[in-house]
Structures are given as C-alpha cells and as structure tokens.
Amino acid sequence: MALSDVTRPNRIDAPTLAPVWPPLPHSAWSDTCATLQLWLQIVGKIRLELTPALNQCWNVTLYPTARGLTTLPMARGTRILQIDCDFVEHKLLVETADGGRRVIPLKPMTVAAFYRQVMDALDSLGAPVSIWHMPAEIEHPIPFEQDEVHKSYDSEFVQRFWHILLQTERVFRIFRARFIGKVSPIHLFWGALDLACTRFSGRTAPPHPSMPGLPDRVTRDAYSHEVSSCGFWPGAPGIEPFFYSYAYPEPPGYRDYPIAPAEASFDSKMGEFVLPYDAVRQSADPDALLLQFLQTTYEAAANCAHWDRAALEAPSAGK
C-alpha cells in the first residue's frame, strides 16, 4: 500500500443522495408497499426455515445494507446461501457460497410470479426450501402462489423507503449504544414491515394477549420479557409513516409521562408513543429530534416500571 493511500483523505466520488430523509406519502406508493411487504415475507420465511430459532424471533429478520436488504448467510445442511434485495439496480440475488447465483429482476409482477421465480431459483441451485405459503400479520391473506392481486413496483418509492431505513438505522445505532443491558439488533420485521430495536429490563413479563395474524407461541416468545421498543413503520392506507415507542407490559403512568418533542404523542388506539415521520423529515435537526423522542420515551418506560437504569445504561447515556 502506498503512503499516499494512507495519508490522503477519503474521497466520495458519487454525489450524496438527497434529500437525506425523503418524502414518503403512503398514498403515493400504497400498492407498491403492499406488494413489497409480501415479497419480503417470502424472503423472510425462507430465512425462518433455514435458521435456528432465536429468542424473540430474532432469527427471522432482515437487515438493511448499502444496496438494500439481506437475509445474511443461511445454512441448508452444510451449504450456505444468502438472499439480497438490491434496491440500487432493482434485482433479487440468490447466491450460494460455492459460486451459485441466480438473479431475479425487481419490477412490476404479481406475488404469485415472484414466489414461483424465487422457488425456481432455489430449486435450480440445488437448495429447495419449503415455506408456509400464507402471509402473516395481514388482513384477508391470499396464499403466495395464488396472489394475482398485488403486483406493483415503483422503484423510486422503494428506494425512498430503503434510504429511510438506512438513516433510521444510523440514528438508532447511536441510541442503541447508550444501553449495556440486553438489547436487540436493529432489524426489519417483515410481518409488519417495521424496523425495530428493543431494550430489555431483564425481568420476565406476563403472557402477551393474542394478536391478529400471529400464533400465540410467536407473540408469547416475542414478549416473554419486559421491554421498551422503538421503531419505524412506513404506514398503511390512511396512516402516514411514523416512528413509534412502546413498553410491554405498559406500566402505570406511562402514557401520561412527559416526553419530547412536542410533535410526539401517545396514540391510545395503537398503545404507543408516535412521532410522525414528516416531523422528523422537516426538522432543522432530524437526528436530534428523533433521538429526543427515543430517549424520552425510553425514560418513560424505564422510570415508570422502575428499571435498574444505573446497571443497564452506559455512563454517558442520554448525554
């Protein structure tokens, strides 16, 4: 390595993507969002089948990358494979550690067509995987192989969503580093399509009530212990995207606890604090606004439930 390679400043040859926090009105990509969620459920269910079960279902999630989303390496016997959604060139990559590779273009197509192409790619690589064919956490689910309804793919809005995931993960990493107790990775749950990070007090929790679209065993595992969880959700028809924070079990006084910023509030219907994405996007300092929300809502959970904050937090937490 030449000395100049060590001493010269890093160069950024490509222009910085702008805006950092792009607009994401749900009405503008509602059909694409629904289709993408179902495509990612297919990919996520493959990861579910090929990974050992972990606490809180952490083995099933997807992870943002510099190009899209990934399953990370998965084992089928002794063979290793990985599936990546490339939202730069809009293609799905199915690759094996022994050099196998299949590419599926991401473009408008039905969920049924996507399902067939992914399964065919796995079969052709000698790595067939059987998954449960019903979507999760969705009203009126259609079996993947029969879904000719959802077929939209707006590449511009898919990229916007992915960019938001990257920026959210970046800020969440700062918040996550303030906690030295048990804390989850920052990962995408494909059931609801939300990026989440969860802190744990260390105490067990009462059995969680049943939730639509999820087996009780999944819900009870996910909420087996006391948590304060935060995340980003892209919204649904009639609901714009927002950041959220909730506690389980909800301690007395939690929903009335003073939090910040002023744009945040407790949504009684959803049972969580919410901060509209547009409030962050339009802020003069989006990072600071979002961190303020994450910190104060965590403090609401920790203080109302009497967590041992001195033992669980890094010395500089919240500073």
Image (cartoon, rainbow, N blue to C red):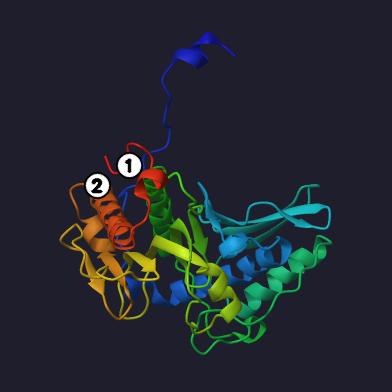
Circle 2 residues within 10 Å: few <14, some 14–19, many ≥20? some
Viewer-nearest of labels 1 and 2? 1
Q: Is residue 16 above or below residue 75?
A: above
Q: Is residue 103 above or below residue 107?
A: above
In the picture, the quarter occupied by the C terminus is top left
- Helix, strand or loop at mark 1: loop
Residue 189 in percent (x, y) is at: 51, 65
What type is the residue that disc 1 sits on? Ala
In the picture, the quarter occupied by the N terminus is top right
Q: Does residue 252 appear left or right of residue 77 in this picture?
A: left
Visible residue check, residue 158 = no
Q: Any mark on residue 317, and which?
A: 1
Residue 148 in percent (x, y) is at: 58, 85
Instruction: From the image, tell me which residue sits under label 2.
Output: 288
Residue 199 in percent (x, y) is at: 43, 55
What type is the residue that disc 2 sits on? Ala
Frontmost residue, 32 versus 171: 171
Asked which quadrant contains residue 310, the reply is top left
Inter-mark Cα distance, 1 to 2:
14 Å
**What residue do we see at 29% from left, 57% from top?**
303
Frontmost residue, 60 versus 271: 271
Q: Is residue 98 above or below residue 4?
A: below
Q: Does residue 105 appear left or right of residue 314 in this picture?
A: right
- Helix, strand or loop at mark 2: helix
Visible residue check, residue 249 = yes
**What residue do we see at 40% from left, 64% from top?**
157
Q: Any mark on residue 232, and which?
A: none
Residue 192 in percent (x, y) is at: 47, 72
**What residue do we see at 35% from left, 37% from top?**
315
Frontmost residue, 271 versus 232: 271
Q: Residue furthest bottom?
A: 140
